[in-house]
Image (cartoon, grey):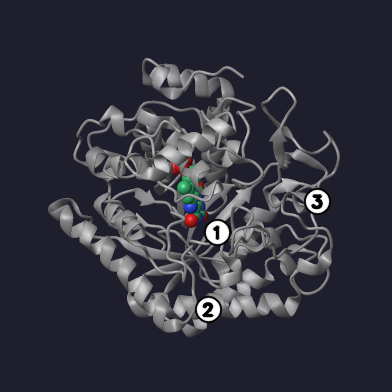
Amino acid sequence: MKFRTPNRFPDLAALHARLGELAPDLDLEEVPDDPDPLAAPLERGGWRLSNRFVVQPMEGWDGTADGGASPDTLRRWRRFGESGAALIWGGEAFAVREDGKANPNQLCHADRGSTLSTLAALRDALLAGHREIGGEAPVDWRLGLQLTHSGRWSRPLAGPAPRIAFRHPVLDPRVGVEDDAVLLSDAELEGIAERYVEVAGCAREVGFDFVDVKACHGYLLHELLAARSRAGSYGGDLGGRSRLMRRIIEEIGRTAPGLDVAVRLSVTDVVPHRKGKDGAGEPDWSAGAPYEHGFGLDPRQPDQPDWSEPLALIEQLVGDGVRWFNLTIGSPYWCPHIQRPASFPPSDGYPPPEDPLAGVAAHLRAVRRVREAQPSIGLVGSGWTYLQEWLPAIARHEVAAGHVDGVGLGRMILSYPDLPRDVIARRAMPKRAVCRTFSDCTTAPRKGLPSGCYPLDPHYKEKPEATRLKELKKEVGR
Ligand SMILES: Cc1cc2nc3c(=O)[nH]c(=O)nc-3n(C[C@H](O)[C@H](O)[C@H](O)COP(=O)(O)O)c2cc1C
């Protein structure tokens, strides 16, 4: 499908007009940047933040074999610090157990001693970044660690080693599940929950301000939220499906006083997509057929979000003491076009089935929907990178209107970590640093290489892996 990429819009009004065609409800308009709402401090949900920029969790597939940080991991965390963003949401997904690693090089908890030293090194790298930027470092900032078990998407060694919450008619064959052998029992889930609590204790000891009990992108706690077909304590109704995450949050609160708990949530979803016969993405599910395997999707009409369960869950979690949420949509494994809207798909994806701006609009709308229901919690939005040079202008509107508190930067932070500081200091954005959503940062790890911005970050451009990645992309035709 043909669409106009954001860098081809001559001005903000033209971009607004296109977004207005795709999502008339958004009602966007230009907001003055002096004073800049993105540079405004915020006090919300118990946190004081010097600005509205958030570094999203961004994994690098570059940890050591025993789950520790490599020089590239530390470089990334230092650059997170150099960004000047006031909120570092998780840094990256940290597996609470070896079997829950999403790739062989994911950071991982093995024992208390090694986790403490890894986390201390990550925090030190971030602080070194702050020192590097001197007076441009945020005065009030928060650092979290994202805790994960990859569940269905676990790959602790070379190939898939799924541990699933329920049988899924489309996703099972994609990860080689043929029977119930890899279905996690209730007792196994409870064992995994204990590891979340253990790692949270380590994060607190090292000086992290919060942990993110990750419930997004198809990983274990997110998959559980859709486990309607699961029998036992952790499936069935929403109470059962959210029981494990709520148990983890409660236990962290009991054992790690002073450590805040936040949640990154895939707040809505779409049915799994695949590459269609014409090459573009298409639903891998019969139109109109009921679909009970999604969270935040109407099972009878799965082409529509259903806000009732996500809003009920958020209300329960707020009651449990969670004050900050980072909202995302779906999963990079079954609907990358919406989870991370891009001009160019990753090697395991498909060309966009719609204008990627529709995906950006879905992210904006999702946060607004939650904001209406929960005016006083802290909310971070995702999926902004596709906007490219227009990112600050659209984000400014959403922040000024009070729709969102934090602007979460994912891919953009890999190519252009200085964006927050440049916007705050009113410096021009260098065109050569702006992420053009080539998806190499996703394709590389899909091919077993470390992630990073191969097209724009000289550190990755010059690595031998950059040549290898080019060859691999040629082989798959992208
Ligand atoms: C290379 C890469 C690594 C990522 N790692 C994580 C992760 O560890 N945890 C997580 O919640 N999301 C992760 N994400 C998703 C991003 O946090 C973000 O949601 C996504 O890139 C969309 O935001 P953007 O448009 O700003 O890129 C990753 C994305 C990419 C491209």
Q: Position of residue 206 (x, y in %)?
A: 34, 77
Q: Give the total of numbered labels.
A: 3
Residue 341 visible within the image = no
**Mark closer to the chain start, 2 or 3:** 2
Residue 367 screen position, x and y as percent: 52, 45
Residue 125 is tagged as none
Q: Which residue is at the front of the view, 102 or 266?
A: 102
Residue 109 in the image: state x and y as whole percent: 49, 74
Considering only order in the chain, which callout, 3 or 1, is on the residue closer to the N terminus?
1
Q: Is residue 23 visible?
A: yes
Check residue 197 in the rendering and tell me which mark sits there, or answer none. Answer: 2
Please, what is the three-letter code of the amino acid marked with disc 1?
Answer: Asn
User: Which residue is located at x 61 percent, y 40 percent?
Assistant: 348
Q: CA distance from mark 2 to mark 1?
A: 22 Å
Q: Is residue 98 above or below residue 54?
A: below
Picture quarter with the N terminus: top right
Q: Residue at x 41, y 17 (%)?
A: 9
Q: Which residue is mark 1?
A: 103
Point out the image quarter for the C terminus. Answer: top right
Residue that numbered label 3 is attached to: 292
Residue drawn at (78%, 50%), measured in percent from left and top?
A: 173
Residue type beneath disc 3: Glu
Tag 2 secondary structure: helix
- As measured in the structure, the alpha-carbon distance from the residue carrying label 1 to the one carrying label 3 is 28 Å
Q: Residue at x 77, y 38 (%)?
A: 284
Q: Position of residue 180 (x, y in %)?
A: 83, 66
- How far, Cα to Cα, is label 2 from label 3? 30 Å
State whether residue 325 is above or below residue 468. below
Relative side of 375 to 9, left or right = right
The secondary element bearing badge 3 is classed as: loop
| First reached walking from the N terminus: tag 2 or tag 1 | 1
